[in-house]
Amino acid sequence: MKKQSLILIIAFFCVKSFAQLGMPMVQYSGNQLLFNPACIGFDDVLAVNLSVRKQWIQLPGSPSLINFNAHMPTKNHKHALGVILQREEWGPLAGNFGYANYAYKVYFSKHVLSLGLQAGFYNSVLDWTKIEHIKDPNDPTLRKDQQSNTNLDVNFGMYWLARNYYLGFSAKHLMPPKLDFARDTFFNKGWYPHMSTQFFLMGGYAIPLQNRWSLRPEGFIRYVHHTPLAVNVGLHAVYDNRYFLGTNVQTGQNTVSFSLKGFVTDWLRIGYSYSVYFGAIQSAQQGSHEISINYQRNNLWRKQRTVGLLWL
């Protein structure tokens, strides 16, 4: 009975952690679609992005994330279409996301307002075979299978883009996916653990310097009910709008990150980031690594750029 109670308590906290999936990305400024569905189809560009992050190296069961997305404007630039595929893993727990993305743009003389919507599926998986039982691997209370369920998921965002700054707001998981496998395994039928809605407020500003250099302070705030407010503040030094060197600080996780990215050709940008953690887990891991690859095809419809620097 004691073993069953212990497993129940551990599983409960795993489910609560799983309900807050959404790993913080260091290079979000170059791939803001991770947070805001309105960040697609700006200028005359087809964009294809791949981001990979491995968190807390050498810590068993540490989180990882893979995100792929592609988006482009329509010929009249008022509409934009995109697609997103993402997978996150946290030990025995995993989340698979797939979205179709649409954005509508309202053009002003020097600004653009974009309204974006994502709709798709969220698939959650609990793999019992990845749970190690050190004392007794043959304990009959341990399951040896996988549980999975799929739910509809919807996200919304707004984005205001100007020549030298941007502002954005978004809400993710507006129809919070239910984790039915947790209900069926541990809880009564009257209670449904689920993903929590996440709210993001983001912004950035470009400060021009001499000789094609600029400084770009950026940041975002993430709010999730019943969790501490997460703040990410960063600063990039940018040369010729092509090469970026920066750092940022994340509250909550006590993290300082360093990143370097740049265009290796006119259409391919590669980035790398390393994160250093301070606090209770500092001695148990060796930081986090993040790699991004961004492909951009310019002059998709042979129109001039509309507004803004190359923020996205």
Image: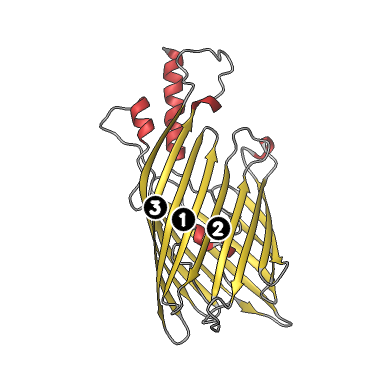
Earlier in the chain: of badge 1 and badge 2, it is 1
Q: Position of residue 69 (x, y in %)?
A: 53, 58
In the picture as drawn, the residue positioned furthest to the bottom comes out as: 109
Q: Colour scheme of this structure image?
A: secondary structure
- Res 222 label: 1
Q: Position of residue 234 (x, y in %)?
A: 61, 62
- Hey, what amino acid is under mark 1? Arg
Please identify the quarter of the rendering in which residue 245 is found: bottom right
Q: Residues within 10 Å of mark 1 (few under 14, many from 20)?
A: some
**Seen in the image, is 136 located left or right of residue 5?**
right
User: In this rendering, which labeled residue sits more in front, label 3 or label 1?
Assistant: 3
Q: Is residue 19 visible?
A: no
What kind of element bears circle 3?
Answer: strand
- Hey, what amino acid is under mark 2? Asn
Q: CA distance from mark 3 to mark 2?
A: 27 Å
Q: Which residue is mark 3?
A: 120
- Hey, what amino acid is under mark 3? Gly
